[in-house]
Structures are given as structure tokens and as C-alpha cells.
């Protein structure tokens, strides 16, 4: 239903040396000087420019969103000379409906990325590099005007809370969805790992049960279900989204440690940053996967994702491999009196957009 086009190629980059060069996303201008140990990497504003063709869409029934998965640390975006986005915070997704800004054929997209020193956007002081650039994917998304919400902190429009009951024999699944319209109905199907339907229901808020539930059980058995939500308006399916989830419960005790599904589950893990030599933070999916493979090879069962929101792809890998995730926002090293608003917005973005089966969030 949704049509997604990723804008990776054909970008022009105007960097610190004021020379415009072609680049492919993901990209950072601090891949070298941010890692040479001199603590003198360049921080400032750089400009990315791209022309793109208007995607095929029906202006009567559809709209077009522009989505950024990560620009560090502040982004100012214009489409065809019109300012449309300002975003503070370098680690979360943000998006905007740009339908009214599009021209018939070719469009010009300009992104000013800024990692300058300031007193309002976290982080400003820490033991890691604040790489500047568009270092995650940029997407054009064509969607029906009646759709699951895409505007609230760039969330997925669905929230799933799944817990076991009846001595871990049944799964209780609470599902909330948000839509851009009041009309229409929302139906939800729950599928097991083989794609077989195990429950269904209707409503923007509903509770479903999974009998003989298969638990998400860490490294031993990271079993995932899928919730498929469909928005139907005037008898036709307008939009559809899906989200994977695990059924589990967990708690932790100050003296005896972490418990998963009622059993002691000692956490042994690593702290992971989203960068590597010669690349900075502009990692490809292959690099994220290699990181996960190495962590699994070590025998870890938990990952601290320091010190900020990581790519959703990596949270997905954590679900698949059975990793418990410790998630953070970049409120670190020193308090900035003028940074309160950004602290709150980054926390809301982390909670709303980073989806994971066992995620413990802290500030």
C-alpha cells in the first residue's frame, strides 16, 4: 500500500572546505578527523543538495512524506526553496508531509546539517564524537491521505504491549493505533512466526489473546509474532502497517538481578556505539549486522546502546537475536540550563519510535 523510495544517490555536498563534491548516503564529514585522537574534529554547518523526481501519486487520494532516519545534530530542510523542517537532535527519525511543496516533475531538496557547539541540543560534552551529517537513510513515502499516524514524533502509529498470563500459557496483547482520520475502521491480525493467524479483532484500541503462547525467551528462543493493522475507509483498505513483537515479562531486583519470564536471567553484555574506523557513524546495514554477529559470537545476551537512540534496524536485530536492550538519550556529562526542551523531545522520540521487545529506557 505504502510506496517507499530511498534517496541514497545523487547528493551534492558542500563541506568545510567550501568545495562541492558528490556523495552517497549515509555520509558524515567527520569520518577521519572525528577518530584521529586529536579531539579537534571540525564542527559546523554543511549543506546537502539533491534533485529528485516527484513520485507517482494520486493528488486526490494520496500524499507524500519526506522522512529522515538520522541527521546530526540539527537539520534545516527546504523543498523547492520553501522551509519545511527544523529538527534538533541527531539520533531519531523525523518526517514531514511535503505534498503541497512538490512540483510537477523535478524538485530540489536542501538539507543544512549542523553539529556546531551550542547550549541547547544534547549532547555537547561526552567521551565520543558528535559526527555531523546525514548518516542514515532519507525516504520519500507515498501514503493514502487516510493513514496510520506519521506525525507524532515520527512514530509508527501503533503501540503493542504483550505480556504472558495464566502461568505463561496465554499471551495478552494490548494494541493501540492512531490514524489521520476519524472515519473508517481498524482491524488487527496477529500472526505467528510462520504467518499463521492466531488472533484478530477490530478497533483503534483492543485486547487480543494468544492461546498456547510461544514466549520470547532471550537467546534461547527469541520468538516473534507480527501484528498487522489495516485501516479501511468506505469499504476499501486505505493503509496497512505491521510490527513484530515478543510476548514476555521481565523485572529486576537490586540484589538478585534481572528476571525474564519469571526466571533468573543474568545479564552479560557490551556497550555499543554506532561507529567504526574510517566510516564514523555512517554505517550501512551490513556493518550493523556485522556488529551484531560479533556481539553474539562473544556470548552476550544484552546490549547497552550508548549514549543515544540507535538505528531501528539494530533494534530489529536485537529482537531477532534475543538481546535485552538498555536504551539511553544523550543527556550526559553536564546539564545545560537551556537544554531542557531538547532533553524532553529526545526522550519522547526514543520511547515513541524505537521499537524493541525488551527495552529498558533510562535518561
Image (cartoon, rainbow, N blue to C red):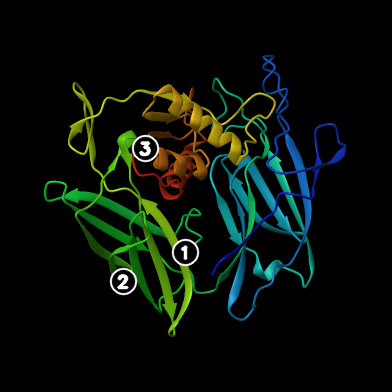
> Under tag 3, what secondary structure?
loop
Point out the image quarter for the C terminus: top left
Residues marked 2 and 1 touching at CB (< 8 Å): no
Dot 1 surroundings within 10 Å: few (below 14), some, or many (20 or more)? some
> Under tag 1, what secondary structure?
loop
Point out the image quarter for the N terminus: bottom right
Residue in the foreground of this view, choosing between 225 and 354: 225
Query: Could you tell me which residue is drawn at 61 percent across and 25 percent down?
Result: 129
Q: Nearer the viewer, mark 2 or mark 3?
A: 3
Whichever of labels 3 and 1 marks the residue nearer the N terminus, that label is 1
Query: Could you tell me which residue is drawn at 54 percent across and 36 percent down?
Result: 289
In space, the residues marked 3 and 1 are separated at their CA atoms by 29 Å
For this orientation, the residue located farthest to the front is: 194
222 to 281, vertically: above or below? below
- The circle on residue 203 is 2
In space, the residues marked 2 and 1 are separated at their CA atoms by 15 Å
Q: What is the quadrant of residue 35 in the picture? A: top right
| Residue 336 in view (yes/no) | no
On the image, the x and y values in percent for residue 36 come to 70, 17
| Residue 33 in view (yes/no) | yes
On the image, the x and y values in percent for residue 332 come to 48, 26
- The circle on residue 322 is 3
On the image, the x and y values in percent for residue 62 come to 59, 74
Residue in the foreground of this view, choosing between 309 and 172: 172
304 to 241, vertically: above or below? above
Residue in the foreground of this view, choosing between 70 and 290: 290
Q: Which residue is mark 1?
A: 149
Query: Could you tell me which residue is drawn at 56 percent across and 41 percent down?
Result: 89
Dot 3 surroundings within 10 Å: few (below 14), some, or many (20 or more)? many
- The circle on residue 314 is none
Amino acid at each position: 500500500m505504502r510506496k517507499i523510495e530511498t534517496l541514497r544517490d545523487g547528493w551534492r555536498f558542500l563541506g568545510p572546505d567550501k568545495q562541492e563534491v558528490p556523495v552517497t548516503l549515509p555520509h558524515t564529514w567527520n569520518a577521519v578527523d572525528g577518530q584521529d585522537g586529536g579531539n579537534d574534529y571540525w564542527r559546523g554547518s554543511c549543506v546537502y543538495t539533491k534533485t529528485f523526481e516527484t513520485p507517482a501519486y494520486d493528488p486526490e487520494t494520496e500524499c507524500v512524506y519526506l522522512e529522515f532516519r538520522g541527521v546530526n545534530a540539527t537539520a534545516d530542510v527546504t523543498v523547492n526553496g520553501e522551509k519545511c523542517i527544523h529538527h534538533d537532535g541527531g539520533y531519531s527519525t523525523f518526517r514531514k508531509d511535503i505534498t503541497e511543496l512538490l512540483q510537477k516533475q523535478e524538485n530540489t531538496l536542501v538539507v543544512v546539517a549542523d553539529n556546531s557547539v551550542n547550549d541547547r541540543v544534547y549532547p555537547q560534552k561526552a567521551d565520543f564524537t558528535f559526527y555531523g551529517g546525514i548518516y542514515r537513510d532519507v525516504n520519500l513515502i507515498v501514503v493514502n491521505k487516510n493513514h496510520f499516524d506519521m506525525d507524532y514524533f515520527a512514530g509508527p502509529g501503533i503501540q503493542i504491549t504483550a505480556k504472558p498470563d495464566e502461568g505463561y500459557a496465554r499471551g495478552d496483547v494490548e494494541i493501540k493505533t492512531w490514524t489521520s482520520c476519524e472515519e473508517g475502521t481498524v482491524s488487527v491480525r496477529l500472526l505467528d512466526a510462520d504467518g499463521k493467524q492466531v488472533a484478530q479483532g477490530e478497533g483503534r484500541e483492543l485486547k487480543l489473546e494468544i492461546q498456547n503462547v510461544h514466549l520470547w525467551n532471550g537467546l534461547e528462543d527469541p520468538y516473534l509474532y507480527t501484528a498487522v493493522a489495516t485501516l479501511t475507509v468506505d469499504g476499501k483498505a486505505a493503509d496497512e502497517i505491521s510490527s513484530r513483537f515478543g510476548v514476555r515479562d521481565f523485572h529486576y531486583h537490586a540484589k538478585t538481578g534481572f528476571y525474564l519470564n519469571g526466571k533468573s536471567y543474568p545479564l552479560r553484555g557490551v556497550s555499543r556505539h554506532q561507529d567504526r574506523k574510517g566510516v564514523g557513524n555512517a554505517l550501512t546495514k551490513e556493518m550493523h549486522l556485522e556488529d551484531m554477529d560479533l556481539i553474539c559470537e562473544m556470548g552476550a545476551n544484552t546490549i547497552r546502546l550508548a549514549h543515544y537512540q540507535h538505528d531501528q534496524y539494530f533494534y530489529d536485530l536485537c529482537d531477532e537475536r534475543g538481546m535485552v536492550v538498555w536504551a539511553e538519550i544523550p543527556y550526559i556529562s553536564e546539564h545545560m540550563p537551556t537544554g531542557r526542551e531538547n532533553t524532553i523531545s529526545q526522550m519522547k522520540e526514543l520511547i515513541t519510535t524505537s521499537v524493541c521487545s525488551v527495552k529498558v529506557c533510562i535518561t
